[in-house]
Image (cartoon, rainbow, N blue to C red):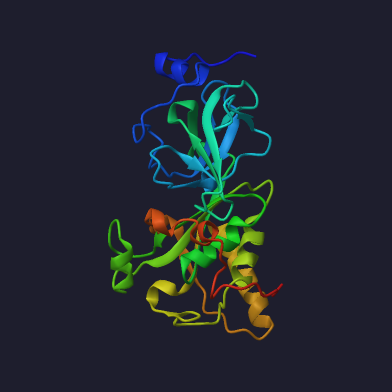
């Protein structure tokens, strides 16, 4: 197997089991959606959904891609090293029992051992945009679906640039709390995602969602093209044929930029080991 050429610092860490200085790595404090591959052999190791801020100064993940990482106890028994299962390149160490996330595991990794590939650069993925009240709950349900590679909480549909959460809460920017869903269309369809959207919130509520009242919590789908718009409208028609009065709006995603929300709003329920208070599943189709 041919490996990538490594510079002197990468060789020191990956080949000679060194450690980069805390808070110096390019992926510390970095939270784009995508996959972290092995710098030496390009094997996918970690998903961005499993990354969290441990405050340690190194990229931290509470899970790995299945079978991609090996654990090797240090000779002195004090720590457990993690290496790439394909090339044995040194990644860092794994720590358990720290209670930092519900999985109770921290893979502490050197940035130089990784190479990030964004979902944006992967042409096989598509994006969909759903607003169904508090984005914490919307994100929770979409991240549970097979074929969804990432779900990011953010803001969409308003008239201000780079809105912040405090500005959204003032209810005058026009933005809706929205989730950007990155998915593999060979594994899950836009129609299936939209059905999930309608089945995990109350699409009849006109003033918000559950106890969250305000214009930022309204129900909407931002469609990328006419095919998506037709899919949403067909599903709305089916629900209205069943006697429901659907309040969900259909908006053009090409006319509204998606702004990702602050880090503390990403993977909210996952990192706390809890479930949504106003998003529950109700079969409607």
Percent x, y for residue 79? 55, 33
The correct choice, above or below, for 122 with respect to 179 in the image is above
Residue 258 in sight in this render: no
User: Is residue 237 rendered to the left or right of residue 169?
Assistant: right
The correct choice, above or below, for 234 with respect to 124 in the image is below
Residue 27 in sight in this render: yes
Q: Nearer the viewer, residue 154 or 110?
A: 110
Q: Count the marks.
A: 0
Residue at screen point 55% across, 37% down = 94
The quarter in which the C terminus is drawn is bottom right
Question: For the view shown, which residue lies furthest in the front direction?
Answer: 76
Residue at screen point 58% across, 27% down = 74
The correct choice, above or below, for 257 with respect to 213 in the image is above
Q: Nearer the viewer, residue 35 or 192?
A: 35
Q: Nearer the viewer, residue 270 or 116?
A: 270
Percent x, y for residue 55? 39, 46
Residue at screen point 59% across, 67% down = 197
Percent x, y for residue 247? 52, 79
Q: Nearer the viewer, residue 199 or 67?
A: 67
The quarter in which the N terminus is drawn is top right
Percent x, y for residue 128? 53, 56
The image quarter containing residue 102 is bottom right
The correct choice, above or below, for 14 with respect to 51 in the image is above
The image quarter containing residue 276 is bottom right
């Amino acid at each position: 197997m041919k490996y990538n050429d490594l510079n002197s610092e990468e060789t020191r860490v990956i080949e000679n089991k060194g450690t980069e200085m805390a808070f110096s790595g390019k992926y510390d404090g970095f939270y784009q959606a995508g996959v972290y591959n092995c710098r030496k052999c390009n094997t996918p190791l970690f998903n961005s959904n499993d990354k969290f801020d441990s405050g340690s100064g190194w990229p931290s993940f509470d899970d790995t891609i299945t079978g991609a990482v090996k654990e090797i106890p240090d000779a002195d028994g004090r720590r457990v090293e993690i290496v790439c299962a394909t090339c044995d390149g040194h990644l860092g160490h794994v720590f358990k029992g720290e209670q930092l996330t519900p999985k109770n595991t921290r893979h502490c990794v050197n940035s130089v051992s990784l190479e990030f590939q964004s979902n944006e650069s992967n042409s096989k993925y598509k994006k969909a945009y759903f607003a169904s009240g508090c984005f914490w709950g919307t994100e929770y349900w979409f991240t549970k679906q097979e074929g969804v590679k990432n779900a990011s909480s953010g803001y969409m549909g308003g008239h201000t640039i780079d809105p912040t959460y405090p500005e959204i809460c003032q209810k005058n920017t026009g933005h809706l709390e929205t989730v950007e869903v990155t998915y593999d269309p060979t594994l899950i369809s836009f129609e299936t995602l939209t059905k999930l959207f309608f089945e995990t919130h109350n699409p009849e509520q006109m003033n918000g969602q559950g106890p969250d009242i305000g214009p930022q919590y309204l129900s909407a789908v931002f469609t990328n093209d006419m095919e998506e718009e037709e899919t949403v409208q067909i599903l709305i028609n089916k629900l209205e044929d069943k006697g429901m009065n659907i309040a969900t709006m259909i908006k053009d995603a090409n006319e509204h930029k998606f702004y990702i929300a602050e880090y503390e709003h990403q993977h909210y329920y996952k990192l706390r080991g809890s479930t949504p208070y106003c998003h529950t599943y109700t079969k409607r189709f």
